[in-house]
Amino acid sequence: MTEPATAPPDSIPPGERDAARRGLTIRVGLSPNPFSDHLSNGGLWTMVDAMEEAGYDSLWLSDSAGIGGLAPLPTLAAVAARTERLKLGTNVLVLPPRNPVLLARELATVDVISNGRMLPAGGLGIDIPSERAALGIESSERVARMEECVTILRALWETEGPVDYEGRFCSLQGIALTPRPVKANFELWLAGNAPAALRRSGRLGNGWIGAYVAPQEFGAMTDVIRAAAQEAGRTIDEDHYGTTLFACPSESEMPPEALRILSRRPELAAEDHIAYGADALRVLLQRFIAEGGSKYVVVPIARDVPGFIAELRTEAIEPLETPRRSR
């Protein structure tokens, strides 16, 4: 999701946020429902093939130690071999427990075998006790480990020669990355809704992907990111702000385990991040576009996933997406 955008303003008045009117590139990808078994009866490939045929922008995979779902990087490598156009995103990789040198090579490898279609995004991970315990990282170290990981990833991706680095958790002596990502400006988006996470996205990220965010919160959150980026002497492309949404044909099809996870912010109204039906998704996307969002990951939760994603594409997404340039 890295098509060129207009130059970022220092600040955007609330009445002028609308992404479509500002000429930003609206794109919508999908993420498999983490509450479903995608390996039985070829469910993953049915979804991937349907997405590629329907013209979806991208496939995004979540990362969790305890909630479930397919492991992102091996799955995206397999999807890369099966597809030609679909971009491949992580929403989001849990960075604190990962070795940054190995992760840099893994992400670069998927980018190379997909001919530059990799879209990495990372974060601290889901902040629930069972997840933190399963990852085995002290709470006091999570942020420091993540920031060091981002620093090392950048150094390895952006430096053609050997990299020396002395950090709190990792020491590099003459480490050079091969293979290297296809794009010279290989980007890493960050996640997280807390004020500290938003400021970190401004200081370190190339973009931000939210989750469990209401449209009326979105603009203020991206303002925090812009301000932090400006304070750090850098800018983030105005086309690089988005969020994750959920879609289901009807409330009766939403499994109880999904509702438990999706209600982890009890003050967040369901209609602000869950769409029941294609019409509701179109309206929800329009609300976020009006607040400046241009990139979206939708998690379809349905009994008939191919049929539902075809309906979403036709009824909700194509009318809003920016037309693609002819090649």
Image (spheres, helix red, strand yellow):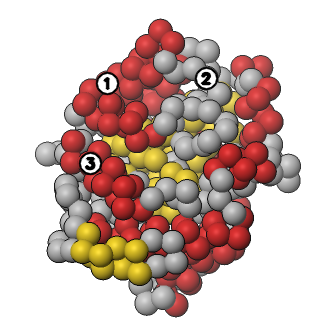
Q: Secondary structure at mark 3?
A: helix
- Rendering coords of residue 141 (x, y %): 65, 69
Q: Is residue 187 visible?
A: yes
Residue displayed at 85% across by 53% down: 267
- Return the residue at label 3: 109
**N-terminal label among 3 and 1:** 1
Q: Are marks 2 and 1 in contact (CB under 8 Å)?
A: no
Q: Secondary structure at mark 2?
A: loop
Kindly identify the amino acid type of the residue bearing the numbered disc 1: Glu
- Return the residue at label 1: 53
**Quadrant in which residue 99 is drawn:** bottom left
Q: Marks 2 and 3, how far apart in space?
A: 28 Å
Q: Residues within 10 Å of mark 2 (few under 14, many from 20)?
A: some
Kindly identify the amino acid type of the residue bearing the numbered disc 2: Ser
**N-terminal label among 2 and 3:** 2
Q: Nearer the viewer, mark 2 or mark 1?
A: 2
Q: Residues within 10 Å of mark 1 (few under 14, many from 20)?
A: few
